[in-house]
Every structure is written in structure tokens, then in C-alpha cells.
């Protein structure tokens, strides 16, 4: 069934439901003690990480509340470790899984559901299936009429972190520290160190993470450039590598590792997300495309350089962190507006030269984050 048809059917059902059992107007909400809140963030890793300042702020402002979250199954290991969250639900597969989840959520008797980021119609339908009296969602959703409050976007240039903070601001929550963060248990970091020792013969003196993949081709800097960068990092810093990627990106990761000509651990989907985060936490630098692993590096406070194409760093790049930088060359592309997923060739990413990346690392990363003993003359 196409998305348009699903939206049409959901719209009809929600309008019927609103006529019989409408959600309550947000003006009626009161911040009573011990409320149960469900957060829906059922899209990708980066979208979830953008939500972490809002989640942290909500938990700190209302410490006696039960805060649950609904995420994609592959993200469960990461959120399950977060002490801010009480229970973590996995987004279902198939109609039977959806029905079972809806019944389980309804039994929780949530007071408020907040759709921080989720694809519609599924996100809004799940929110309504809980029976919660108050639902917050984006004013840009085609199903915004079914919310207690539809949260507007202040501008097209508003950063994704701020857009999510706008939701909890409706509950009176103000957040000063807006950096993304993930909770990494000590045993996970220790286990990751053991994996690196086993693979590299010891913890590398300079371990650099590379992420040459991405959700779509239009987001990927050419693999050949990653190979050139890796060889330069070996000459300059005697680097070893952690090549991040999914199982579908195995061949790409192995190609970059071969071009690097140095020891490299290619994850290729061999580890759950929490273990991959543990491995990344030991890195001295991450260079990657605009994708989940880049944002994970920022959340772990690993110095991270992002290579951006279709989306501007002002909206989804490093935000208020000195350990993050981005390169973005929108002026290199004649297409305006950007055609993103229909892009036949990512000209904007191809315009980023290897020498430019190396120069920025020498100017920003080396003097601020690298010990003097780890530098070489090249």
C-alpha cells in the first residue's frame, strides 16, 4: 500500500475518531506528579540523537515521571542504557506486530504522547492507539489536526535539536546544555577496548574512525577520497582505523580499509549499536558523511568532521560543540532547490577535495585534540 493511500485512510479514521473521542486541548494539561509519558522517535539514528537534549531536559525537569520511548529495533541497545528512560519499545514489523504493540501501549495508560520525530501515518496512529488524552506532534505533519498541540517550526533554518526542544518547551522545560549525548556503560567501553586489543594487538595510539557510507548515494563522499584521506592520516599520524558501516556497506568499508594500507577494523554490522558506540568512544577522530555515525561521534564527544551535501550543517550539523566541524559546498551545485534523493550525482560532495579535509584537520583537530607526541612531519 502506497504512503499516500495510507495517509488518506489514516486521515479519514482520525477525523472519525476526533468526532467521537477527541484528544484534549493542550490548554487543559497540568504538570501533575507521576505522569507517564511516551516519546515516539521512530526514524533513524541521527533523528534519535537530535532528540537527546530534549529527553534529558524532560527527565531532569520532571524526575518523578515515567518516561518511555518508542524507537526502531536497531536503536534499542543504545536507548536501553539511558538512565533517563524507564521503558523502551521497538517499532513493530507487520500488521500483527503493530496491533500487539498498540495493545501493549494502551495498557500503559500514558498521560502524554510526544511525537519527537516519526513517519506518518504510523507515528500518529500509534500515538492515538495509546488512548492518551494529550498528544503533541509537528505542525508540519499532514495529520496535525489530530494533536492536542501542533508544534510549529520557527524557521526553515532552525536546527533539528531546537525543533525537538520546542516540544518539551510546551511542558515548561528549558534546556541550557543542548549537546547531544548518549549513556555508555563502563562495561561496554571496556568490552570495546578488548575488541580493539584483540584486533590491533593493543589499543592504537591514534585510532581514527571513518564512515564512508550513508543512507543514500547522494550523501556519500567518493570512496576514493576516503582512501586518499586514510593514506594521508597514516603518513601524518601513523593512524589505525575503525571503519563504520552496516552489513550492506561491508564491501565499501573493506574497499576503504584496503586503500588505507594500515590496520583497520571494519564493523560492517557485526556489532550492535551500543558496542559500535563503545568502539567509537576510543577514537581520537571521526571523519564521515552526514549520517548517523557522525552524529553518534558528536554525542560521544569524539572530535568529528562531517562532509555534508544535500542538507545544510546549520540545520543538522554540529551544534554548540567545539569538537564538531563540517564542510559544506552548496555553491558547487547549480541545482536550486536541491533535488536530494533524485540527485543523479552529488556534485556538492565531489567538490570537497581531499586536500581541503587534510588542511582543516591540521588547522582545527591537530592543535586542539591531538597529543604532540602523536604528530609527524609530512
Image: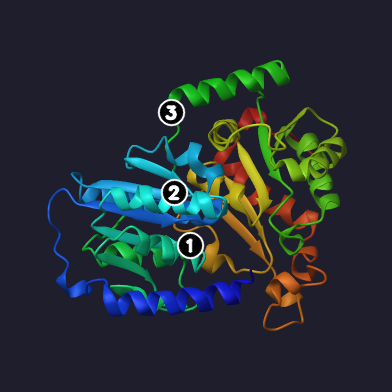
10 Å neighbourhood of mark 3: few (<14), some, or many (≥20)? few
Are the two marked residues, 3 and 1, in contact with CB atoms closer than 8 angstroms?
no
As helix, strand or loop, the secondary structure at mark 3 comes to loop
Of the two numbered discs 2 and 3 on the same chain, state the one appearing first in sequence: 2
Could you tell me how far apart the alpha carbons at marks 2 and 3 are, in whole angstroms?
A: 31 Å
Disc 2 marks which residue? 100
10 Å neighbourhood of mark 2: few (<14), some, or many (≥20)? few
Could you tell me how far apart the alpha carbons at marks 3 and 1 are, in whole angstroms?
A: 27 Å
Could you tell me how far apart the alpha carbons at marks 2 and 1 are, in whole angstroms?
A: 19 Å
Disc 3 marks which residue? 185
Q: Residue at x 36, y 78 (%)?
A: 16
Disc 1 marks which residue? 118
- x%, y% of residue 281? 54, 34
- x%, y% of residue 2? 64, 71
10 Å neighbourhood of mark 1: few (<14), some, or many (≥20)? many
Q: 322 or 253: which is nearer to us?
A: 253
Amino acid at each position: 500500500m502506497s504512503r499516500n493511500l495510507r495517509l488518506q485512510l489514516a486521515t479519514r479514521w482520525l477525523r472519525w475518531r476526533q468526532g467521537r473521542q477527541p484528544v484534549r486541548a493542550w490548554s487543559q494539561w497540568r504538570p501533575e506528579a507521576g505522569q507517564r509519558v511516551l516519546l515516539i522517535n521512530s526514524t533513524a539514528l541521527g533523528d534519535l540523537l537530535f532528540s537527546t537534549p530534549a529527553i534529558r531536559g524532560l527527565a531532569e525537569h520532571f524526575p518523578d515521571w515515567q518516561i518511555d520511548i518508542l524507537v526502531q529495533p536497531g536503536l534499542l541497545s543504545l536507548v536501553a542504557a539511558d538512565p533517563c528512560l524507564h521503558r523502551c519499545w521497538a517499532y513493530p514489523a507487520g500488521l500483527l506486530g503493530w496491533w500487539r504493540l498498540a495493545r501493549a501501549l494502551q495498557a500503559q495508560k500514558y498521560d502524554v504522547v510526544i511525537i519527537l520525530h516519526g513517519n506518518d501515518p504510523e507515528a500518529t496512529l500509534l500515538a492515538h492507539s495509546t488512548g492518551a488524552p494529550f498528544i503533541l506532534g509537528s505542525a508540519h505533519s499532514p495529520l496535525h489536526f489530530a494533536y492536542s498541540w501542533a508544534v510549529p517550526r520557527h524557521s526553515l533554518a532552525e536546527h533539528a535539536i531546537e525543533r525537538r526542544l520546542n516540544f518539551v518547551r510546551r511542558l515548561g522545560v528549558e534546556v541550557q546544555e543542548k549537546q547531544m549525548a548518549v549513556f555508555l556503560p563502563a562495561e561496554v567501553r571496556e568490552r570495546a577496548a578488548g575488541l580493539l586489543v584483540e584486533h590491533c594487538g593493543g589499543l592504537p595510539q591514534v585510532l581514527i574512525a571513518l564512515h564512508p557510507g550513508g543512507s543514500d548515494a547522494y550523501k556519500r563522499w567518493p570512496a576514493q577520497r576516503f582512501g586518499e584521506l586514510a593514506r594521508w592520516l597514516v603518513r601524518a599520524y601513523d593512524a589505525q582505523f575503525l571503519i563504520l558501516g552496516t552489513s550492506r556497506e561491508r564491501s565499501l568499508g573493506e574497499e576503504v580499509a584496503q586503500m588505507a594500507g594500515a590496520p583497520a577494523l571494519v564493523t560492517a554490522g557485526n556489532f550492535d549499536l551500543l558496542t559500535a558506540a563503545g568502539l567509537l568512544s576510543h577514537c581520537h577522530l571521526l571523519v564521515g558523511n552526514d549520517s548517523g555515525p557522525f552524529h553518534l561521534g558528536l554525542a560521544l564527544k569524539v572530535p568529528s568532521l562531517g562532509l555534508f551535501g544535500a542538507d545544510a550543517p546549520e540545520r543538522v550539523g554540529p551544534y554548540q560543540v567545539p569538537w564538531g566541524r563540517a564542510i559544506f559546498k552548496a555553491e558547487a551545485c547549480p541545482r536550486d532547490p536541491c533535488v536530494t534523493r533524485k540527485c543523479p550525482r552529488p556534485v556538492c560532495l565531489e567538490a570537497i577535495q581531499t586536500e581541503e579535509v587534510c588542511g582543516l584537520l591540521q588547522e582545527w583537530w591537530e592543535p586542539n585534540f591531538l597529543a604532540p607526541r602523536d604528530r609527524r612531519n609530512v
